Image (tube, rainbow, N blue to C red):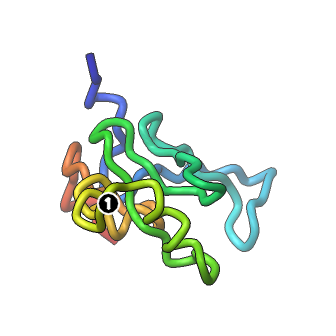
Amino acid sequence: MKDSSVIPKGQYCYTWENDPNGSSGFLPGKAKYCPYYGSKMMNGVEIPWCSFLSLGGTDNNWKAGDWEKVRESYPSEEAMDKELPLFLLWDSCKECGENFDESLAQ
């Protein structure tokens, strides 16, 4: 059974944990991702994937030819669109709607 209580609050698939002693790029701290957020390999292409919804999405950072490689895994473009409708997941934007908290919207 899926547990929506472990999904981070807010509009993203992660929460930010401050760490004054560490740094991850330009901000001190690190992202703590939702346990349902991840990726799935398909024909050598990494697909952003939400296991809570059992759906994925296309990626804004795909290289030329990646879309065609993924498309080959499906019997039709409609079947691909049905399983990969989450267009903002590549950027860790929450699309499940769980624990969305307006007060945390940035």
Residue denoted by label 1? 80
Task: Estimate the x, y position of residue 99 in percent, counting from the top left.
Answer: 22, 44
40 left or right of 56 in image: right
Instruction: Identify the amino acid type marked 1.
Output: Met
Which of the 4 image quadrants contains residue 46? Answer: bottom right
Task: Estimate the x, y position of residue 24 in percent, counting from the top left.
Answer: 74, 61
Location of residue 90 with respect to 83 vertically, above or below = below
Task: Estimate the x, y position of residue 10 in percent, counting from the top left.
Answer: 30, 54
Query: Which residue is at a point 24% across and 49% down the rendered structure image?
Result: 96
Q: Front-most of 96 and 19?
A: 96
Query: Which residue is at a point 46% across and 44% down the rendered structure image?
Result: 37
Which of the 4 image quadrants contains residue 29? Answer: bottom right
Task: Estimate the x, y position of residue 62 in percent, counting from the top left.
Answer: 58, 75
Location of residue 41 with respect to 59 vertically, above or below = above
Secondary structure at badge 1 equals helix
Quarter that holds the N terminus: top left
15 left or right of 22 in image: left
20 left or right of 104 in image: right
Q: Front-most of 43 and 4?
A: 43
Quarter that holds the C terminus: bottom left
- The extreme front residue here reads 75
Which of the 4 image quadrants contains residue 44? Answer: bottom right
- The extreme top residue here reads 1
Q: Front-most of 105 and 76?
A: 76
Query: Which residue is at a point 68% across and 67% down the rendered structure image?
Result: 27
Using a 10 Å C-alpha cutoff, classify the residue at mark 1 as few (fewer than 14 neighbours), some (14 to 19) or many (20 or more): some
Query: Which residue is at a point 77% across and 59% down the rendered structure image?
Result: 23
